Structure formats: C-alpha cells, structure tokens
Image (tube, helix red, strand yellow):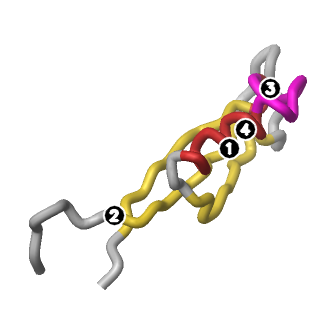
C-alpha cells in the first residue's frame, strides 16, 4: 500500500502580489523536493484594517503530498 506524507503552507497575497516569479520559485522548490500540489483554497478576509477589505482573500492555503519511501531494511 502506498503511503504519503502531507505538508500545508500558507501564502500571503501581500508577499506575492508584486512577483509571480516569487510564487513560481516557491512552488518549484517544493516540486524539486518531491512535493506535489494537491489542492489550494482561500478564505475571505473578515474584519478590516488598512491592509485588507472585507471579502478580499489575503491568504491561500496550499496542501502538498509526497510518497513516503520505505526505510532500508524495513519490512511490512
């Protein structure tokens, strides 16, 4: 049976809004380490501040997975 491990990261739109390359670099970094993007989602911002508007997503959650490699000498 194939087993996976999962990683969750949060991307702040304020960090990536000026640079698509920055987001691509982050995604490529995870891909080189064997992580595959499974899904992503965002929530509308609740509340207000000088940096956000109600209903505008500020952060996105990305979920990655990668196959677990069996340890050498381990048996199932």
Quadrant location of residue 45? top right
The secondary structure type at the circle numbered 3 is loop
Q: Is residue 35 above or below residue 24?
A: below
CB under 8 Å between discs 4 and 3: yes
Q: CA distance from mark 4 to mark 1?
A: 24 Å
The residue that mark 2 highlights is: 68
> Which comes before the other along the chain, label 4 or label 1?
1
Element assignment for label 4: loop
The residue tagged 1 is 27
Camera-side residue of 71 and 19: 71
Give the alpha-carbon distance from disc 1 to disc 3, as whole Å.
Answer: 25 Å
Please tell me which of labels 1 and 3 falls first in the chain. 1
The mark that comes first in sequence, 2 or 3, is 3
Query: Which mark sits nearer the N-terminus, 4 or 3?
Result: 4
How many numbered discs? 4
| Outermost residue toward the front in this view | 73
Q: Main secondary structure of the magenta part?
A: helix
Quick check: marks 1 and 3 in contact, CB under 8 Å? no
Label 4 crowd (10 A; few <14 / some 14-19 / many >=20): some
Residue at image point 80% right, 19% down: 51
Magenta residues span 15-22
> Which residue is label 3 attached to?
52
Precedes in sequence: disc 2 or disc 4 = 4
Residue beneath label 4, please? 45
**Which label sits in the foreground, 4 or 1?**
1
């Amino acid at each position: 049976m194939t087993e996976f491990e999962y990683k969750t990261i949060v991307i702040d739109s304020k960090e990536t809004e000026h640079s698509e390359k920055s987001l691509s670099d982050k995604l490529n970094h995870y891909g080189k380490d064997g992580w595959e993007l499974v899904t992503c989602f965002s929530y509308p911002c609740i509340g207000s501040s000088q940096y956000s508007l109600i209903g505008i997503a500020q952060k996105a959650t990305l979920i990655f997975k990668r196959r677990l490699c069996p340890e050498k000498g381990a048996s199932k």
